[in-house]
Each structure stands twice: as C-alpha cells, then as structure tokens.
Image: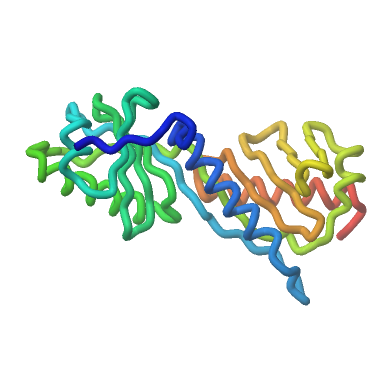
Amino acid sequence: MVKKTSKKAKKSSVKTKKKSVVKKAVKKTLKKKPKHPEKTLEIVNIVVSASLGHDIPLEKMAATLPNTEYNPEQFPGLVIRIKDPKTSALIFSSGKIVCTGARTMENVRESIRKIIKQLEKINVKIKEQPEVTIQNIVASGSIGMDLNLNVLAMKLDNTEYEPEQFPGLVYKIPSRRATFLLFSNGKIVCTGTKSAQEVHDAVDQLVEILKKVTGKK
C-alpha cells in the first residue's frame, strides 16, 4: 500500500530537506566559541543529481521497499532514505535522481549503489553506473575572528541582515557562486559551490575581504 502524508504535514521534499540541512549547519555554528579560535571548514552536505537511465515504477517501489515516501498528489518524486551512509534521495519516474545528505563523494556513490541494489528487488536492473553531477555543496566552520555584523552590513554590498529575525548576516561574493551566512562569533555556513576547491577558494576570498573591511590582519 502506498504511504501518504497530509497536505498540511508535507511540503516539497526538496525544500524540506534543504531547510533541514541548512538549519543543522546553522545550529552547529552557534555552539560555544572556543578559547583559541582557528580557521576550520567542514563539508556537511553534498547535493548531486544523476540519471539511472531507466524508467522507475514509483508506486511499486513505494509499496515494496522500506524507508520510502510517495504521495504523487503532492509531489511527483519518491523519497527514499538510506541509513548508512545517512542520506536521502528523490527519485522520479523518468529515472532522474537527486541525492542529499552525503558528506563525501564516496558517500554519494555508496548511496546510489544501495538504491540500485534496492531496485533489483522490483526487477529494475540498472546496467550502467550513473554519471553524477554536483549541484551544491554546503560547508560550515569558523574563520577564527569575531565579526561586527552591523558594520559589515553597512560596508559590504550584496548583504542581508535582519537581526530581529535571524542572528546571521547573508553575504554573497559577487565574483563567485558562494553565499555565506556569517555570525558574530566568526562561525560561517557556505552554500552554492560545486566542488571542495571552490569552497576553500571562496572562504579564502571571504577572509581577505573581511580583513580589508575590518582592518584586521
């Protein structure tokens, strides 16, 4: 029997997952400030897309396989959750797939392998390894310096800061795809990049920009 969720309880699975990942990253940044802050950075979510190259019977998949959610009246994709590595994937009847929650590309590949193995149980055999495309990387960490967000909001372009609603400042570097959440304790969340190198390059550029604005060395 196909599992269903109410309209009130479920929005788009993609949006829900993205919000959950960002909330977890934000929560992590608001932990107690260390006595000796250092620059740190950790990838917390890799979002990828791929094609399985085969039509997928979603109703049969939802009725047969565990850890799945499918409500076509609300959203055309099926959600499947993998316990190890802890990831989730959206699967569409066309065979398109979006995987979220992985922290490494090995986690991504292992999750897709497990999904393919699950599909064999409903007689769907994927013969070729899907080509994976990174759509977004979310990273969190610290730049090792305190920040005056009011000053940054005035001196930097491309910022959004509403301290009454949210304690972080949103800053987008014009020359890059990276968007940052900055907190007064120096913690950051970076999103929008598509490779680990892009993440590190964006953070390095952010630090240089902040040093120029604040006069810190």
Picture coordinates of residue 70, whole percent (x, y): 30, 34
State the image quarter where residue 96 is shown.
Answer: top left
Q: Residue at x 80, y 46 (%)?
A: 209
- Tell which of 18 and 50 is nearer to you: 18
Name the residue furthest left: 123
Q: Is residue 11 above or below residue 80?
A: above
Q: Is residue 45 above or below residue 6?
A: below
- Tell which of 114 and 71 is nearer to you: 71
Relative horizontal placement of residue 44, taking residue 180 as reference (left or right): left
Picture coordinates of residue 63, whole percent (x, y): 18, 39
Q: Residue at x 83, y 43 (%)?
A: 164
Relative horizontal placement of residue 166, taking residue 106 as reference (left or right): right
Picture coordinates of residue 160, whole percent (x, y): 78, 35
Picture coordinates of residue 143, whole percent (x, y): 73, 59
Name the residue furthest bottom: 35
Quadrant for the C terminus in the image: bottom right
Quadrant for the N terminus in the image: top left
Relative horizontal placement of residue 119, taking residue 84 as reference (left or right): left
How has the structure been colored for display? rainbow
Q: Is residue 31 above or below residue 101?
A: below
